[in-house]
Image (cartoon, grey):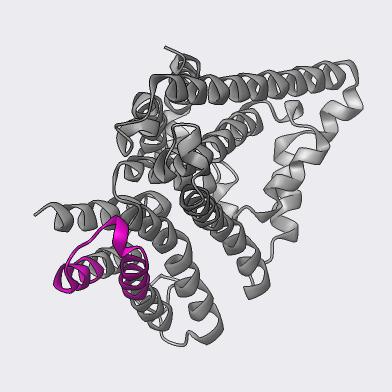
Amino acid sequence: MLYLPTTLIFFGYTIITFIYVIRNKKEKIENHLFINELLIVALLLIAGILFPFMFQFHSPDLSSESLNFMWFFTSTIFLVEIGILFAILIYNTIISKRNPEIMEERDYSKYCEEFNKNWVDDLKSELGRKFLHLFTTFIIFFFWTLGVILEDLGILNKFGLDNYSFAYWLIINVGYGFIIMFQIADLARLNRFYMIPNWAKRWYLDMKQNELHTFIASTPLVLSFIPFLFTPFPIFASVALITTGADAAACIIGKKYGKHTLRKNSNKTIEGFIAGGFTTFLIVFIITILYHVWMPVSIVKILLMATVATILFLLVDAYAKNISDNILNPFLTGFGMWLILII
């Protein structure tokens, strides 16, 4: 039951986020945000439901002592994090309400005006945003590599762990911790902006304009990776790298070299479209070959998985409108590869 605090935290986020979305239903529908935000609610619920099964799924021999310690450590970290975040929000609420000047300064409509005034949509700004997304993938590969090294050295075995349980434990701690931090920050930003300290406003400098009145794209991105923790590592790694790397390639190539519009009333280009599809194929092929020991399949199946992932990525890139590609890309490409694996 030591997993219960983390599960309850995410159930709480699910309820609070759902209430926020329903209360603002009319506005969300008008701005084509309603379905996307309901999906975020569903992803938060899934994160809470799946958490108790993650550490041991790929490690059935994991001892109950090791499992309980991992649950205890993770839940303790998250409870401390929640406590600190609430303390910061409460403190800023008190000082803002006591000082009318601070309250006026922290008016969200004024913040949005200033943000729009300074907004720059160029290649340099896009590189900064994509780098943050790619850093998520770097963490995944770093912890996995660390786990492999420690397992080969026999260190993990002394603690009753293996590469999967150790690496995924670290990845989950960082990923869930990120969601906890940014979801509470986003809920405060969208509802009670005066609760946000000035230093935290820097977090939002890399937002896109279409994220001003909804949750930042990074939260659904990380949430969408969660179901694929139950797949072999090559699929999980491919999903993460497609969502961040292939999307970045499509965006950057499109901005720098794009000359031909993909379709009317779209800022996407054919050049970026092709770059994203080509990068997706390479990612699946290379990752599956490099990590073949953790998913030993034939070259025919590898090519089929890469082809299916590429087609699904291109479909999302071409036709996705009101649902974030940070949700659609991992779900469609990930489940597509997973299906090919099991048939």
The single residue placed furthest to the top in the displayed view is 1
Quarter of the picture holding the C terminus? bottom left
The answer to whether residue 217 is seen in the rendering is no
- In this rendering, would 309 be left or right of 140? left
**Residue 23 position in % (x across, y down):** 47, 22
- Check the image and report above or below for 218 versus 308: above
Per the rendered image, the range of residues in magenta is 281-307
- Position of 42 compared to 337: left or right? right
Vertical arrangement, residue 130 with respect to residue 162, above or below: below
Residue 54 picture quarter: top left
Q: Among all residues in the image, which is located at the extreme left? A: 343
Residue occupying image coordinates x 39% and y 73%: 276
Quadrant location of the N terminus? top left
Q: Position of residue 176 (x, y in %)?
A: 52, 34
Please indicate, yes or no, whether residue 106 appears anywhere in the rendered image. yes
Question: Residue drawn 47% across and 53% down?
Answer: 152
> Quarter of the image holding residue 53?
top left
Q: Give left or right: position of 103 versus 79.
A: right
Q: Which of 160 and 338 is in front in this view?
A: 160
The reply to whether the magenta stretch includes residue 154 is no
Q: Is residue 284 above or below residue 199?
A: below
